[in-house]
Amino acid sequence: MRRRAFVECGAALGLTLAGASARAAAPRLRIGLTAVILSDQAAFLARWSDYLSLRVGVEVVFVARESYQSILDLLFSGQLDAAWICGYPYVRHQAQLKLLAVPVYQGAPLYQSYLIRARDGAIELKGWSALKHRVLAYSDPLSNSGWLVAQAQLRAAGLSERDLRRAFFAHGHRNVAEAVATGLAHAGCIDGYVWETMQLQKIALVAKTQVIWKSDFYAFPPIVVRQGDRNNALAGLGEALLTMHGEPQGQDLLRALNLSGFSKPAPALFDSIKALATSVSAART
């Protein structure tokens, strides 16, 4: 009896381990992104994951990190299958990356960079030239709207970072808004889509800031995959994103993101960011 119980226990353990191994080996798509701007981020990503998984036919999971560089490191090392990054790192690594989908915001795959200040700030700031001897908050060193645009505008105003009292990276657009609202920075460089979306969500700290400058329009941060990746499920992921706007559940998810949908424009859409990166790089050498 004891021998039979031992055999049965061993068989059950074997089935459990086999099941766990099968689950671990099950195909999945891993999408990397930086912090989503929603207050219910975990709940939203779970809903979006379920939506995409059902349509792609494999489990889709989201992996959040604080910086674009961390996301790129995971993507290039094969630990991610796709990534929602900024246009600046895309043009820097364009030979290694392929566009999967680009969000559509207010009817176009475009957005702007904003310069913001505190709404009730004691110091009046009216533009880039007023930043001399002030504290400026950036978002991320690989952010177009939160760093690259600012470098070009400072130069156009006849300033460099040496003319500022201090500049620092807040590591996230929401953190830029918080730094400005709480007085840690006199001004901040922020993604205009993020600022407008947080306004719609009535996030208190954003209500304490105001926009004092808007950039030209640039290509919206894209979802990318590695060039040459032969994972067949990636085509299904791209199709699921591009058709979200045509389904009620997809429309609900897009409304939560304050987006109209996803598109797949030509890489040339990012040429203005590429030109900006070239000019800033040349000026800093």
Image (cartoon, grey):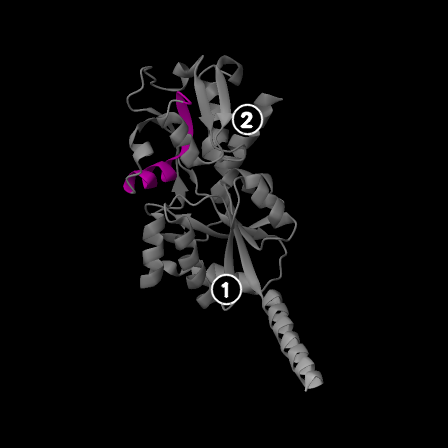
Using the rendered view, name the quadrant where residue 176 is placed.
top left
Magenta region includes residue 210: no
Residue at 56% in and 45% down: 71
Q: Secondary structure at mark 1?
A: helix
The amino acid type found where label 2 is placed reads Val
Q: Contact, CB < 8 Å: mark 1 with mark 2?
A: no
Q: Which residue is mark 1?
A: 236
Most foreground residue, 203 or 160: 203
Distance, label 1 to label 2, CA atoms, is 37 Å
In percent of width and height, residue 198 lies at 33, 39
- Mark before the other along the chain sequence, 1 or 2: 1
In percent of width and height, residue 59 lies at 51, 64
* Residues in magenta, as a range: 184-200
Q: Secondary structure at mark 2?
A: helix
Q: Is residue 77 left or right of residue 83?
A: right
In percent of width and height, residue 153 lies at 45, 23
Residue at 50% in and 13% down: 163
- Tell us which disc is closer to us: 1 or 2: 1
In percent of width and height, residue 227 lies at 61, 53
Q: Is residue 78 left or right of residue 101?
A: right
Residue at 38% in and 39% down: 194
What's the mark number on residue 280?
2
Most foreground residue, 10 or 133: 10
